[in-house]
Amino acid sequence: MNKPFKFKQFTVKQDQCAMKIGTDGVLLGAWSTIKKQPFAALDIGAGTGILSLMLAQRCDAEVIDALEIDEMAYEQCVDNFETSPWSDRLFCYHADLAEFTEEIEDQYDLIICNPPFYSEDYKTEYIERDLARFQDAMPFAHLLESVSKLLIKDGTFCTIIPFKEESQFIALASAVNLKLNKITRVRGNLYSDIKRSLIEMSFHESEIISNELVIENARHNYTEAYVNLTKNFYLKM
């Protein structure tokens, strides 16, 4: 698990990070919209920096800022940025979201976040992993309020959350004027329950685009839709 993760155009070291590279991050990094060709993007709770690196590969945004509170993860993120082909466009802040939101004067065209949430219903002995995984560290209401302040008027916010949190998340977003524009619900395979919701929001109401993504037909036999989404990143796709 601690080995560097090699993608087609970059490598991510993850030995200092509580949360390793997983499907959620890669899905969000590949799915997030870049149709407006963002000038400045922000990755909240960057961890290894995977989302920022994927964005840098996908688009020409001149500014890709990342935010990470955990010191070891922050140092790893900086290292991953510096050794990537896009080091001149990537910058990581070691700060808490509330403090960053208050102090930064910039706003962003695109904000992405793979937020911490409950993957299990208990806490482990590993405090860093709990911080990365549990919503205590970044409750949705706090995240959405910060996004509403950091996003430009025509900006876009993309995130991935547990499907069971979807309606609560959309209601909390609506309280800060963020509207749902697109949602992709994710299943592991055709017969499994919906596990995750990929969400795109902005301050503008639009017809909601809604679809489903199935990851596998069978174990390690990936669906065409999943391959098409991730093939520019995974070595074996």
Image: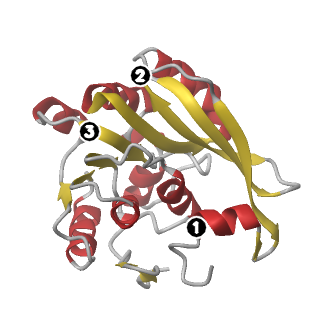
Position of residue 60 measured from the top left corner of the image (x, y, whole percent): 30, 59
Residue at the extreme front of the image, as rendered: 36
For the residues labelled 3 and 2, the Cα–Cα distance comes to 13 Å
The residue lying at 55 percent from left, 30 percent from top is 181
Residue 167 found in image quarter: top right
Position of residue 190 measured from the top left corner of the image (x, y, whole percent): 86, 56
Residue 203, which numbered label?
Answer: 2
Element under disc 2: loop
The residue lying at 36 percent from left, 59 percent from top is 59
Residue 230, which numbered label?
Answer: 1
Element under disc 3: strand
- Which comes sooner in the sequence, label 3 or label 2? 3
The residue lying at 40 percent from left, 46 percent from top is 112
- Which comes sooner in the sequence, label 3 or label 1? 3
The answer to which of 144 and 224 lies nearer the viewer is: 224
Position of residue 95 measured from the top left corner of the image (x, y, whole percent): 19, 47
Task: Bin the neighbour count of mark 2 within 10 Å (Cα to Cα): few under 14, some 14-19, many 20 and up.
Answer: many
* 38 vs 152: above or below: below
Verify CB contact (< 8 Å) between mark 1 and mark 2.
no
For the residues labelled 1 and 2, the Cα–Cα distance comes to 28 Å
Query: Which residue, given by chain and number where applicable, does mark 3 sit on?
Result: 108
The residue lying at 25 percent from left, 71 percent from top is 86
Position of residue 215 measured from the top left corner of the image (x, y, whole percent): 72, 62
